[in-house]
């Protein structure tokens, strides 16, 4: 029941040992196993289809079957392609600092994905790099959202900008950026309220914040446990806001994280960081090869 | 699914529909294999038959008794558990509102003493619903907070006590032990409590929810599931496999951020929604 993809492919290749080259026919079962592994990992159905046909194309004609370990050769083809799609050695994964400070970063995403916690983590990350950070509590809806960010700010000794009586998130963002300028902050991190991609009013609010402050980065924060719907959500956030990158949270669990592939595929935007815990130092750069192994269950 | 004949293409369409609803490829293949047999035996003659047969199969899986347990002691203790950010605290506000609307004296316990401002968040909800809350400092022992709340609710004659807990990933051994301790400590005061242990699952989540359900259930014995965030485009299909395997009923669904956005789960409505194409 817990056979790994390796075991399954090994069994498949045993049956076709001795054949010289990969053909569409003799590779069918191996491809099927990869497909199942990706679907089990929550990679979107359509994204799997596309990925599988790319792999198949790469594998055709390869002489893997003569190898002593054809399953491993095949897995390597799959793994490499997955790394490639997840970003390969794309260098755009770092956060670009604006030569004219402050660098403005906006965090957006569905409810509960981890935006506020990630705002704290990013603040800590920049703080460690010697930057002076301003956190902005721009979630005016969720009960105690401002308190949550203020507590994180206090833990980090990072300033938090908030306006408890203001009912306009656009105004708060604008004033926060003004404040950051006059206080000579290096980085401004704006925490926004969680919202559904189909909530037109609230998506419009994000667009207005974007227009008002012209952020350097709009980071889409997504939960690694997200299922098939990741494509719909990421696609809409990207279409509405032209996001600049993705942060995948809650990777400290045992979710395979296929959403990473789905999101990358539909947005074309780089995954920049991952969250690996509730504490503010549980934050790492995104490594495509690690993610690929995880998705394949290796 | 507007086709005239049952063919491989139609079965593939169904596969896509189910997988994209997060039913999961394993459960999907199980369902499709079950009808494949009926198709070959000509029991199912056209796509309409096929659709109805599948709908029925899923309905039968989900349609298990999902009423709240009846007890004749007070307070009725509900413990709410789940992984991070799924909607536990908001669901507690909604359930409290429901009980309050039904004239029951309801109290909350701020058992998430870990996450920043978790206590403030529950306090805001307690104020909005207008029910009392038992709380201590951030960082205090959650078992102690919830124990105190049970004692207090009992002494003051409350009908219902709903306890919040911190979000925790099922893979974290220590945090799952902390949950077991909460249950143990509650039992010291009321041996039959918690009367309900509700596991909150996010409809947006994929196959990981299966592990969540299994491991939370093994740790503390889950009596019901609350499926939240159904107001989005995710269908929450992962519960089909979960209910099938663990026989834990879905008791409520959440469909918004407001305190009235909660309903008892209805298997028929849920199955109908599964068959609605999204785009
Ligand atoms: N285990 C784990 N938990 C995380 C991680 N990131 C965030 N969380 C937890 O996830 C829950 C939700 O995090 P928040 O930061 O409040 O999420 P949010 O997106 O701001 O939520 P809303 O503002 O309500 O939309 C909290 O319990 C966090 O502690 C992570 O990387 N790992
Ligand atoms: N759209 C929608 N949002 C919801 C629903 N239920 C909760 N939320 C939102 O999801 C986010 C997280 O909800 P919480 O109730 O704080 O979740 P939690 O499980 O208590 O989170 P932690 O305590 O951090 O683990 C908040 O922004 C809620 O408003 C729902 O049914 N639909
Ligand atoms: K939905
Ligand atoms: Mg937040
Ligand atoms: Mg909570």
Image (cartoon, coloured by chain):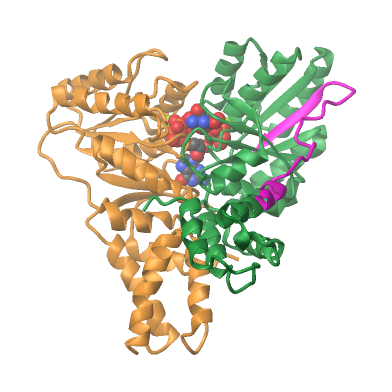
Say which of B271 and B17 sits in front.
B17
Query: Relative to B187, is B51 above or below?
Result: below
Residue at x 33%, y 29% (from the top left corner): B176
From the top left corner, tell me how far across and down residue B40 is, in percent: 36, 86
> As rendered, which of B199 and A196 lies closer to the eye?
B199
Relative to A57, A214 lies left or right? right
> The magenta stretch spans which residues?
A80-108
Q: Is residue A118 left or right of residue B236?
A: right
Residue found at x 26% / y 25% = B182
Any magenta on residue A88?
Answer: yes
Q: Is residue A71 visible?
A: yes
In the image, residue B93 sits, relative to residue A17, either above or below, namely: above
Q: Is residue A185 above or below residue A171?
A: above
Chain rendered green: A
Q: Residue A106 location in percent, x, y?
A: 72, 33
The spot of residue A171 in percent (x, y) is 74, 30
Quadrant of residue A26 in the image?
Answer: bottom right
In the orientation shown, which residue stands out farthest toward the right? A100
Residue A27: say if magenta: no
In which quadrant of the rendered view does residue B199 lie?
top left
Compared to residue B84, the image places residue B110 above or below, namely: above
Please name whichever residue, B183 or B175, is drawn nearer the observer in this view of the structure. B175
Which residue is at the far left? B72
Identify the residue at image location x=58%, y=51%: A72
Residue in front for this viewpoint, A53 or B276:
A53
Q: Which chain is orange?
A: B
Q: Is residue B67 left or right of residue A173?
A: left
Task: Answer whether residue B108 is visible to the viewer in this image.
Answer: no
Q: State the count of labels.
A: 0
């Amino acid at each position: 029941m817990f056979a790994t993809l390796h075991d399954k492919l090994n069994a498949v290749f045993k049956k076709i040992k001795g054949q010289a080259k990969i053909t569409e026919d003799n590779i069918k079962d191996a491809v099927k196993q990869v497909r199942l592994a990706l679907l089990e990992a929550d990679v979107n159905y359509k994204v799997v289809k596309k990925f599988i046909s790319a792999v198949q194309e790469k594998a055709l004609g390869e002489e893997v079957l003569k190898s002593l370990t054809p399953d491993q050769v095949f897995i390597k083809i799959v793994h490499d392609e997955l790394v490639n799609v997840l970003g390969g050695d794309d260098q755009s994964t770092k956060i670009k600092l604006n030569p004219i400070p402050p660098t403005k970063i906006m965090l957006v995403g569905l409810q509960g994905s981890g935006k506020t916690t990630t705002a704290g983590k990013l603040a800590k990350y920049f703080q460690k790099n010697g930057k002076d950070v301003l956190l902005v509590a721009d979630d005016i809806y969720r009960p105690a959202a401002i308190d949550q960010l203020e507590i994180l700010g206090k833990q980090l000794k990072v300033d938090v900008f908030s306006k408890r009586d203001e009912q306009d998130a656009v105004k708060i963002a604008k004033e926060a950026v003004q404040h950051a300028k006059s206080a000579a902050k290096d980085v401004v991190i704006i925490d926004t309220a969680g919202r559904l991609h189909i909530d037109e009013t609230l998506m419009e609010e994000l667009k207005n914040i974007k227009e008002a402050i012209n952020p350097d980065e709009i980071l889409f924060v997504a939960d690694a446990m997200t299922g098939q719907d990741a494509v719909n959500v990421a696609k809409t956030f990207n279409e509405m806001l032209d996001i600049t990158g993705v942060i995948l949270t809650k990777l400290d669990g045992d979710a395979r994280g296929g959403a990473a592939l789905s999101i990358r595929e539909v947005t074309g935007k780089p995954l920049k960081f991952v969250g690996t815990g509730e504490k503010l130092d549980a934050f790492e750069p995104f490594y495509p090869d690690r993610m690929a192994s995880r998705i394949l269950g290796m | 699914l507007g086709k005239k004949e049952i063919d491989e293409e139609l079965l593939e369409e169904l596969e896509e529909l189910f997988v994209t609803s997060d039913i999961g490829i394993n459960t999907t293949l199980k369902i499709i294999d079950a009808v494949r047999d009926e198709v070959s035996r000509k029991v199912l003659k056209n796509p309409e038959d096929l659709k109805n047969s599948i709908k029925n199969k899923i309905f039968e899986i989900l349609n298990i008794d999902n009423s709240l347990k009846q007890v004749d002691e007070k307070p009725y203790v509900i413990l709410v558990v789940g992984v991070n950010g799924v909607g536990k605290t908001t669901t507690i506000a909604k359930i409290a509102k429901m009980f309050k609307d039904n004239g029951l004296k309801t109290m909350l316990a701020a058992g998430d003493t870990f996450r920043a401002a978790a206590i403030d968040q529950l306090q805001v909800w307690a104020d909005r619903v207008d029910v009392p809350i038992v709380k201590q400092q951030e960082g205090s022992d959650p078992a102690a907070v919830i124990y105190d709340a049970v004692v207090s609710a009992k002494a003051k004659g409350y009908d219902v006590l709903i306890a919040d807990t911190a979000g925790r990933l099922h893979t974290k051994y220590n945090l799952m032990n902390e949950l077991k301790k909460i249950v143990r400590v509650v039992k010291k005061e009321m041996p039959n409590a918690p009367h309900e242990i509700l596991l909150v699952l996010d409809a947006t989540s994929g196959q990981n929810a299966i592990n969540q359900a299994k491991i939370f259930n093994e740790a503390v014995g889950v009596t019901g599931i609350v499926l939240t965030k159904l107001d989005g485009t995710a269908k929450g299909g992962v519960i089909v496999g979960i209910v099938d395997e663990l026989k834990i009923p879905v008791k409520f669904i959440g469909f918004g951020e407001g305190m009235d956005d909660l309903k008892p789960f209805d298997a028929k409505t849920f199955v109908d929604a599964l068959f609605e194409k999204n785009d």
